[in-house]
């Protein structure tokens, strides 16, 4: 894949004005038709049929691609949503998020983070110390975009995740997004769980912790979810962070460690040994 020949393809589906699904890829010109067909098929695979689907195809003109290695992955064993959220708060604190901000983020995601109560298409940007929300549009949030795996890294991550029964496309896509986000200037950590009522897993991700999957972060059939990106205000330039997240193209060309499920105390022991 040469950098000059790359295109970003984005799919967004909505029904009744509400966001239903979205996905995106970075591909070579010769793969555009096949990938666009796949994204279109995905827009129709939800129970509620979309009344609007947008496929946006854009050449990544003159934009240098940043190549990254995926964050290391592990899963924390939790028994229910409460122990899942408790684990998330403790891992966020290890990454440098204050207890106040972690609690605020968990409360916002569980209550519905946008002022209208709809799912936000993008992420909340939160001061990792005070918990103050910093994204300019609280209804929309800031959407990380323009990231994907190279073909080789995709095949590797897919087979290694599948070997651990983590074959869902959401895990693979979230890992690539979280890798881009964790390498952003001023980012301390990220917390996410899905707004898909059928998908109850989520994660905490950061450079020091890696991508920590938490299999249960909400009750089944709960439509609330989203992302919070915690930032260090002392080094934050909000405009350049948003620019990096929304427009800088990132390709993941290498896969990190992919570990089995472990308990939270065992994970903290591993971190202490590093
Ligand atoms: C989403 O994009 O809907 C969030 C996906 C969270 C994935 C958690 C995982 O399976 O690792």
Image (tube, grey):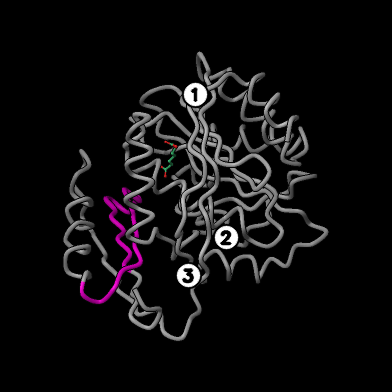
Residue 44 lies, in percent from the top left, at: 18, 49
Task: Check the image and name the residue furthest to the bottom.
Answer: 62
Number of the front mark, 1 or 2: 1
Q: Earlier in the sequence, mark 2 or mark 3?
A: 2
- The residue beneath circle 2 is 137
* Residue at the spot 50% in from the left edge and 32% down from the top edge: 259
For the residue labelled by badge 3, is the local secondary structure a helix, a strand or a loop? Answer: loop
Number of the front mark, 2 or 3: 3
Residue 165 lies, in percent from the top left, at: 34, 29
Residue 85 lies, in percent from the top left, at: 59, 25
* Residue at the spot 24% in from the left edge and 60% down from the top edge: 53
- In depth, the one of 264 and 67 nearer the eye is 67
Residue 113 lies, in percent from the top left, at: 55, 43
- The residue beneath circle 1 is 261
Q: Earlier in the sequence, mark 3 or mark 1?
A: 3
Label 3 close to label 1 by CB (< 8 Å):
no
Which residues make up the magenta segment? 9-30
* Residue at the spot 76% in from the left edge and 35% down from the top edge: 100
- The residue beneath circle 3 is 249
Residue 264 vertical position relative to residue 28 in the rendered view, above or below = above
Q: Separation of disc 2 and disc 3 at Cα?
A: 23 Å
Quarter holding the C terminus is top right
Left or right: 92, with 10 as reference point: right
Q: How many marks?
A: 3
Q: Is residue 12 magenta?
A: yes
For the residue labelled by badge 1, is the local secondary structure a helix, a strand or a loop? Answer: strand
Label 1 close to label 2 by CB (< 8 Å):
no
* Residue at the spot 35% in from the left edge and 53% down from the top edge: 154
């Amino acid at each position: 894949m040469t950098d000059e020949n790359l295109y970003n393809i984005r799919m967004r589906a909505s029904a009744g004005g509400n966001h239903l699904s979205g996905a995106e890829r970075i591909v070579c010109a010769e793969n555009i038709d096949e990938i666009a067909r796949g994204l279109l098929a995905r827009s129709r695979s939800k129970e509620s049929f979309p009344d609007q689907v947008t496929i946006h195809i854009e050449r990544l003109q003159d934009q240098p691609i940043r190549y990254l290695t995926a964050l290391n992955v592990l899963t924390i064993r939790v028994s229910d949503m409460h122990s899942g959220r408790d684990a998330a708060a403790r891992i966020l604190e290890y990454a440098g998020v204050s207890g106040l901000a972690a609690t605020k983020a968990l409360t916002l995601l569980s209550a519905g983070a946008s002022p209208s109560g709809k799912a936000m298409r993008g992420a909340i940007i939160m001061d990792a110390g005070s918990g103050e929300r910093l994204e300019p549009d609280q209804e929309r949030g800031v959407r990380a975009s323009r990231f994907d795996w190279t073909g080789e890294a995709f095949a590797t991550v897919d087979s290694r995740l599948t070997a651990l029964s983590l074959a869902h496309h959401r895990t693979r896509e979230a890992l690539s997004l979280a890798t881009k986000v964790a390498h952003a200037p001023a980012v301390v950590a990220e917390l996410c769980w899905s707004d898909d009522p059928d998908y109850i897993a989520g994660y905490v991700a950061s450079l020091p912790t890696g991508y920590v999957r938490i299999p249960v972060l909400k009750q089944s059939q709960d439509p609330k979810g989203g992302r919070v990106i915690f930032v260090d205000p002392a080094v934050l330039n909000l405009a350049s962070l948003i620019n990096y997240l929304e427009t800088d193209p990132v390709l993941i060309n290498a896969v990190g460690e992919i570990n089995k499920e472990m308990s939270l105390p065992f994970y903290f022991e591993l971190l202490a040994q590093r």
